Image (tube, rainbow, N blue to C red):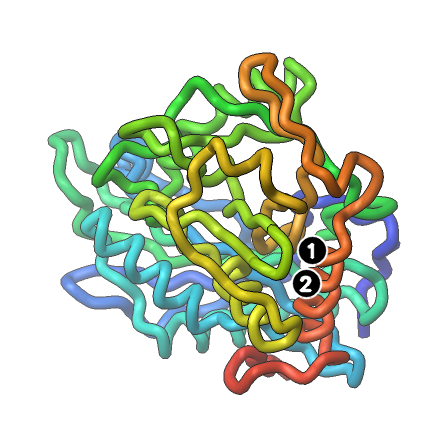
Amino acid sequence: MSKNIDWSSLGFGYMPTDYRYVSYFKDGKWDEGQLVSDPNIVLNECACVFQYAQTVFEGLKAYTTANGDIVTFRPDLNAARLADSAKRLEIPPVSEEQFLDAVKKVVEANKDFVPPYGSGASLYIRPYIMGTNAVIGVKPAEEYQFRILVTPVGPYFKGGAKPIVIKVSDYDRAAPHGTGNIKAGLNYAMSLYPIVKAHEEGFSENMYLDPATRTKVEETGGANIIFIKGNKFITPKSDSILPSITRRSLMIVAEKYLGLEVEHREVLFDEIKDMDEMGLCGTAAVISPVGRVNDHGNIIDIPSGMTEMGPTLTKLRETLLGIQEGTVEAPEGWIYKIC
């Protein structure tokens, strides 16, 4: 039976649920993992995660579909990306099999926290791995925890997806040949100062340019960028952009469902003025429309305007949400049934 929660009032925040998953890495191997009820973690003061930020994470959601099933969306891609992130930070990766089993167990154990179909809410799933033994010299940990917490969250947009204004950041999100293409906690720590400053100045997000030449569009602090130009779906390509699962899915939806021409390529900042629509994409919002870009006082207004999401991005968002919620037929392998 569902919990007595006012699903319509949920924001995008943390609410403790009944169970979380934990697996321990020790003596060179991961254990089989278990569900625990305590939301608190006790670690040594010198744990590697505290000293050298040796931690990586993922984000995905569980949904109640139109026929009442509880499902997740392409979790195999989250498993692969978590493994890639872990390898880059010298963390022992978790197998896809264990990742999927853990997701299934923790969602099923907290199924009463999965919002009902049609509520606009979902169960956010946060898997993460961290180095846990004491490390004072600069080196990888020898012991780790792989954990998954879940929390019900409301729709990212209350009252509709209104276009936002973003600014071109003076800071770099990632270094050339750095860690921009993995989901490491340290990347997000680096973005906190710029995003606080952006919010103080009245902007919703920062746009980061390529760190080498600062002439190409990369991404924002927490989302990939997408553009519509005529019949084309265009998204920036770079070795320092996080491979967003939402963006990769939208590329397929754009081509196979909407008949758009897809271009995944380098995008020059100077091209933005010629685009018809612009958006940010990610797990939380699916698509967040951008109506204006501020480049140090030089304003670029996107033709779709500041009133509502453009027509093509609206179709993309509705189609992807329909796939996730079971009202649009999904490509094979995209939907993973929990229960």
Vertical placement of residue 322 versus 37, above or below: below
Left or right: where 19 falls relative to 316: left
Q: Amino acid at mark 1?
A: Leu
Indicate which disc residue 128 carries.
none
Query: Looking at this view, is 43 or 128 the one in front?
Result: 128
Vertical placement of residue 2 versus 216, above or below: below
What residue do we see at 34% from left, 55% from top? Answer: 145
Q: Is residue 339 visible?
A: yes
Left or right: where 24 falls relative to 28: right
Which image quarter: residue 283? bottom right
Q: Say which element carries label 1.
A: helix
What residue do we see at 18% from left, 36% from top? Answer: 135
* Residue indicated by mark 1: 313
Q: Please report contact status of discs 1 and 2: CB closer than 8 Å, yes or no.
A: yes
Query: Looking at this view, is 68 or 294 the one in front?
Result: 294
Q: Say which element carries label 2.
A: helix
* Residue indicated by mark 2: 316
Residue 39's spot in the image, x, y percent?
55, 50
How far apart in space, not on screen, are marks 1 and 2 (Cα)?
5 Å
Q: Quadrant of the C terminus?
A: bottom right
